[in-house]
Image: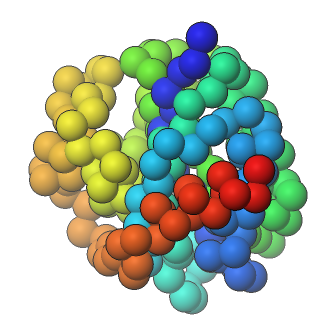
Amino acid sequence: MMRNVYLALGAREGAPETQIREGVARLWGSGLRPVAASGLWETEPIGLRPGRPVLNAALHAVTPLGPHETLEACFRAEEAAGRRRDPPEWRSLDVDILLFDDLVLTTPDLTLPHPRFHLRRFNLAPLAEIAADLRHPILGSTIGELLRDCEDSAWARVLDPRWGASLVERVRIIR
């Protein structure tokens, strides 16, 4: 059975756009098939040391993997990009599972839906591009409604609105 998964991708250090693109290719290699990707967004760094903006995107993929297997695929993609979680943190690629079908799950290592994505403009703005009518399985609001009502004052601006469509096509050609 194929499942729908919605991911947030972010990168700041090194070559962020390349790392996001290569991360999507690694996810494909782990069993996640891209369906749609948002444009590339530049967002205000939150909880990070001052510096350049973060590049963000959202990805809709289908997969036969379960939620924990998907999480492991995300960790492998981050690790391959050189992500460090210990100080000094290196945010070369960050991949978060925002939604996994309508699944509501709380385990020691995974909470679905992502417990804070509905409060973050840097997650909601890219996700609304590709899934504005998708409903949050706990809150019942659509992604578009959550973005409209989001009180997060951090800025987010789209850099390349066609980036996602070309990314999905490039990844399909590579694979």
Residue 145 visible at all: yes
Q: Residue at x 69, y 57 (%)?
A: 173
Q: Position of residue 36 (x, y in %)?
A: 46, 48
On screen, residue 164 above or below 4: below
Q: Residue at x 79, y 37 (%)?
A: 30
Colouring scheme, one of rainbow, by chain, secondary structure, one colour = rainbow
**Is 79 situated left or right of 109 in this image?**
right
Q: Residue at x 45, y 16 (%)?
A: 104
* Total labels drawn: 0
On screen, residue 56 above or below 146: below
Q: Position of residue 59 (x, y in %)?
A: 50, 49
Q: Position of residue 8 (x, y in %)?
A: 51, 51
Q: Looking at this rendering, what residue extends furthest in the bottom direction?
A: 51
Q: Position of residue 162 (x, y in %)?
A: 40, 71
Quadrant of the snapshot with the N terminus: top right
Residue 119 visible at all: no
- Along the line of sight, the residue nearer the viewer: 36 or 153: 36
Q: Quadrant of residue 94?
A: bottom right
**Is 158 situated left or right of 71 in this image?**
left
On screen, residue 117 above or below 32: below
Q: Looking at this rendering, what residue extends furthest in the front direction?
A: 173
**Is 107 situated left or right of 73 in this image?**
left
Q: Quadrant of residue 48?
A: bottom right
Q: Residue at x 19, y 57 (%)?
A: 151
Q: Looking at this rendering, what residue extends furthest in the top direction?
A: 1
**Is 32 situated left or right of 99 in this image?**
right
- Along the line of sight, the residue nearer the viewer: 117 or 72: 72
